[in-house]
Each structure stands twice: as structure tokens, then as C-alpha cells.
Image (cartoon, grey):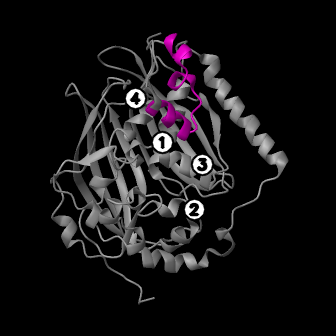
């Protein structure tokens, strides 16, 4: 390896701040099976999102997309506007997501286009990779009626892959998955059932009489595997061959300075599309192939930041129920989901206010995501519009 880097040249990044960006757009409308596949990939067993008969009895009268599905209404899960400007030898991880949901809800038959822009960035020194850029990019989600349904501000952590790999040499036994006994797995499955029953018991009723101090039921996810990460990735419509097109607008994401092992070969993809879909070749291969995970500073295969954001939104929305609406959320991601690890989600109501226009209660939920050892993976807050009492 070369000498450690101490600075990061952001000259090329400066050219893209505040510039409207092009990128991938979807050819087709949302199909009901896209929503079902999403719920399955995100391990969200709420029948509102996959069971036709159950959904028919809901306030929607049909299967509706979870609010987390919004991130599946764009190509690049909201990360691309935050990855602009060439910095040679870099890779990226998700650092967090802030969401503003304006409504309406998303149904089969809807079709979205995205408007994108790099918002800002800052460079800091980190223990993980030395000089590291935290850049934020905005995506507006616009439906076929011209309505801005949601806005996402995604944080990308851009860093020199070589620096992260140098530091990661000290991971040692962390390169191996932890092991779980049959008894431990059985206990985890019991916890999952308890969480599922918590929103099934609410059913089609309204979540009311919420007060500060109310605890959300704990949600366990995992233990994570290469199979679960692959199922997640394949639930993103953008990973389906031929599902999208480039709108021709300016965008430098593909030329952001990726190391060769994480680059996509568009010419080869014209013959063999696996060279362009990200999982077998490209920036997402490290999620399911440990050798590439270690190349960019991860001890072993790891999960998707966009999926962590979806888990958070699903967790809050499932608790709140079908008559409620997540208005805003802002969560930072501090550690990935690694194969073999278990993720725990916990939440608490820390505030209850009123909407000025409707008088409906708004609950502020603080939530965390941790591993089985208590290591913090994510934290933040969400505001939920609850039904009138």
C-alpha cells in the first residue's frame, strides 16, 4: 500500500453542488407484485402490503405500498445525488436519510420520476478511513399527476477504499460470522412473533391515546445472511434487467472515482446484463461477496443503508397503524448490518403535539438500531400524524 492519505481533493465535487442532475428513471408503473416483493425483501410481514383480502378490509380498500417503498421509486435508492464529482480510489457507504412525506400514499399503477441535486458536503477525519466526505443529496419523488409525494435527503460517506482496507486489517476474528445455538435462534423467532402480533392485534383499528413514554415493541431482524441481503437487493426494482433508462441529464455518479473492482462495465452489460446490475459486478458486490467487502474496509458481507432506512420507516409505521402517516424522519447510520449479526429495533414516544391545521395528534418517536452486542447501528426520530381521538 501507498503512504496514508491525510487530505481529500474536492475540486471536482464543488462543480456539482446545487446543479440539477439526471439519472435513471423507470419505464413502467408500479405493479402490485412489486409491492409484495418489497415487503418480502424488507422482512415486513404486515398483510396490508401483500394480502389482497386483508388489504380490502383496510382504510385503503386494496394493497397499498408501505411508506418505505418510496425509496424503491427511484433508480439508485436516493444515493446517487450525493455521489457527485470524481475522487479517484473512493467508495461509499450510506450515512443516513432524512425524509419529508407529503402524500398521497402509493398504490399499484402509480409511476414516478425523480428530480435530483447534490445539496452540500463536508470533509472530516475519521478512524474508519482517514479523510472522509459526508455529502448530502436530495431526491424529489414526483408521481404521474405531478405531485411531489416525498423528498429524501440522503447522506453518502465517501472515503478512500485503500485507507479503510488498511485500517480494517486489524479486524481479525471479526471477519468470521458469530455463531448461534438452536436455543438462541428459537428465542429470536419468539421475539419476532411477538413483534408481528403487536401490529396484527391492532389490525384495522386506530392507534389512539398515545402518550410520552410509550414503548414500541422490540423488533429483531436477522441473524443476517448473504441470502437475506440478496433477497433485499432483488426487491429493488432498479435491479431488474431493463427496468429503467437514463434520462440523459448530467450526472457523475458512474464516474465518481470508484475502484476498478466496484465499477460497472456498461459495454459488457449490453451483452451480459449481470455486468451492470450491481450485485455480481459493481458497487454492491461487497454486500454479498466477503472478498470485496474487505477490499473496501468491511470485515465481512454487509447490508444496505437504504434497507436500514426502510426498516426504520416500517418499524414506526407498523406500530402507528394504517390510519396514521409518517410525516418526517431523520436517522443517521453509524454501523452496518453484518452477516451473522442480529439487529434490534427499539423505540419510544418522546413527544406528543397537535397538527395546527387538523388538530390531530403528532407523535415524535425516538428509535435506535443496535446489534446483539449493543453496538449502535442507527438512531434518530420520526414524526407520525395519528388519527383524531
Query: Which numbered disc flags the more N-terminal residue, 1 or 2?
Result: 1
Q: Position of residue 356 (x, y in %)?
A: 31, 19
The residue under label 3 is 228
Q: Is residue 204 magenta?
A: no
Q: Residues within 10 Å of mark 3 (few under 14, many from 20)?
A: some
**Nearer to us: label 4 or label 2:** 4
* Disc 4 from disc 2: Cα separation: 31 Å
Query: Which numbered disc flags the more N-terminal residue, 4 or 1?
Result: 4
Mark 2 residue element: loop
* In the depicted structure, whether residue 354 falls above or below residue 157: above
The residue under label 4 is 31
Query: Which numbered disc flags the more N-terminal residue, 4 or 2?
Result: 4
* In the depicted structure, whether residue 223 falls above or below residue 148: below
Left or right: where 337 falls relative to 173: left
From which residue to which does the magenta span run?
Answer: 34-57
The residue under label 1 is 235
Q: Is residue 46 magenta?
A: yes
* Disc 4 from disc 3: Cα separation: 23 Å
Give the residue furthest to the front. 271
Label of residue 301 in the image = 2
Residue at the location (16% across, 53% down)? 18
Q: Main secondary structure of the magenta part?
A: helix
Q: Residues within 10 Å of mark 2 (few under 14, many from 20)?
A: many
Dots 4, 1 in contact, CB < 8 A: no
Mark 3 residue element: helix
Residue at the location (49% across, 49% down)? 233
* Disc 1 from disc 3: Cα separation: 11 Å
Q: Residues within 10 Å of mark 4 (few under 14, many from 20)?
A: some
Query: Which numbered disc flags the more N-terminal residue, 4 or 3?
Result: 4
**Nearer to us: label 1 or label 2:** 1
Amino acid at each position: 500500500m501507498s503512504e496514508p492519505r491525510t487530505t481529500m481533493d474536492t475540486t471536482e465535487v464543488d462543480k456539482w453542488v446545487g446543479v440539477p442532475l439526471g439519472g435513471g428513471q423507470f419505464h413502467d408503473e408500479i405493479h402490485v407484485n412489486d409491492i409484495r416483493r418489497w415487503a418480502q425483501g424488507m422482512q415486513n410481514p404486515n398483510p396490508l402490503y401483500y394480502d389482497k383480502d386483508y388489504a380490502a378490509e383496510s382504510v385503503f380498500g386494496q394493497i397499498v405500498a408501505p411508506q418505505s417503498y418510496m425509496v424503491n421509486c427511484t433508480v439508485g435508492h436516493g444515493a446517487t445525488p450525493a455521489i457527485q464529482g470524481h475522487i479517484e480510489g473512493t467508495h461509499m457507504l450510506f450515512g443516513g436519510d432524512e425524509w419529508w412525506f407529503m402524500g398521497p400514499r402509493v398504490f399499484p399503477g402509480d409511476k414516478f420520476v425523480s428530480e435530483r441535486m447534490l445539496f452540500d458536503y463536508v470533509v472530516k477525519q475519521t478512524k474508519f478511513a482517514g479523510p472522509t466526505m459526508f455529502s448530502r443529496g436530495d431526491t424529489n419523488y414526483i408521481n404521474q399527476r405531478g405531485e411531489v409525494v416525498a423528498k429524501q435527503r440522503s447522506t453518502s460517506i465517501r472515503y478512500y477504499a485503500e485507507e479503510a482496507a488498511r485500517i480494517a486489517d486489524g479486524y481479525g476474528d471479526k471477519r468470521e460470522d458469530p455463531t448461534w445455538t438452536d436455543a438462541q435462534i428459537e428465542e429470536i423467532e419468539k421475539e419476532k412473533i411477538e413483534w408481528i402480533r403487536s401490529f396484527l392485534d391492532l389490525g384495522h383499528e386506530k392507534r389512539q391515546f398515545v402518550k410520552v413514554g410509550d414503548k414500541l415493541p422490540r423488533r429483531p431482524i436477522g441473524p443476517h445472511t448473504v441470502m437475506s441481503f440478496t433477497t433485499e437487493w432483488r426487491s429493488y426494482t432498479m435491479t431488474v434487467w431493463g427496468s429503467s433508462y437514463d434520462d440523459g441529464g448530467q450526472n457523475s455518479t458512474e464516474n465518481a472515482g470508484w475502484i476498478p473492482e466496484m465499477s460497472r462495465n456498461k459495454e459488457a452489460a449490453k451483452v451480459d446484463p449481470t455486468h451492470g446490475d450491481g450485485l455480481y459486478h459493481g458497487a454492491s458486490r461487497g454486500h454479498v461477496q466477503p472478498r470485496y467487502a474487505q477490499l473496501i474496509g468491511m470485515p465481512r458481507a454487509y447490508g444496505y443503508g437504504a434497507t436500514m432506512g426502510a426498516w426504520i420507516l416500517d418499524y414506526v409505521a407498523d406500530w402507528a397503524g394504517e390510519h396514521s402517516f409518517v410525516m418526517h424522519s431523520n436517522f443517521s447510520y453509524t454501523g452496518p448490518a453484518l452477516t451473522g449479526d442480529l439487529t434490534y429495533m427499539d423505540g419510544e414516544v418522546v413527544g406528543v403535539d397537535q397538527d395546527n391545521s387538523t388538530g390531530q395528534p403528532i407523535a415524535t418517536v425516538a428509535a435506535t438500531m443496535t446489534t446483539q452486542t449493543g453496538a449502535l447501528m442507527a438512531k434518530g426520530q420520526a414524526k407520525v400524524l395519528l388519527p383524531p381521538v
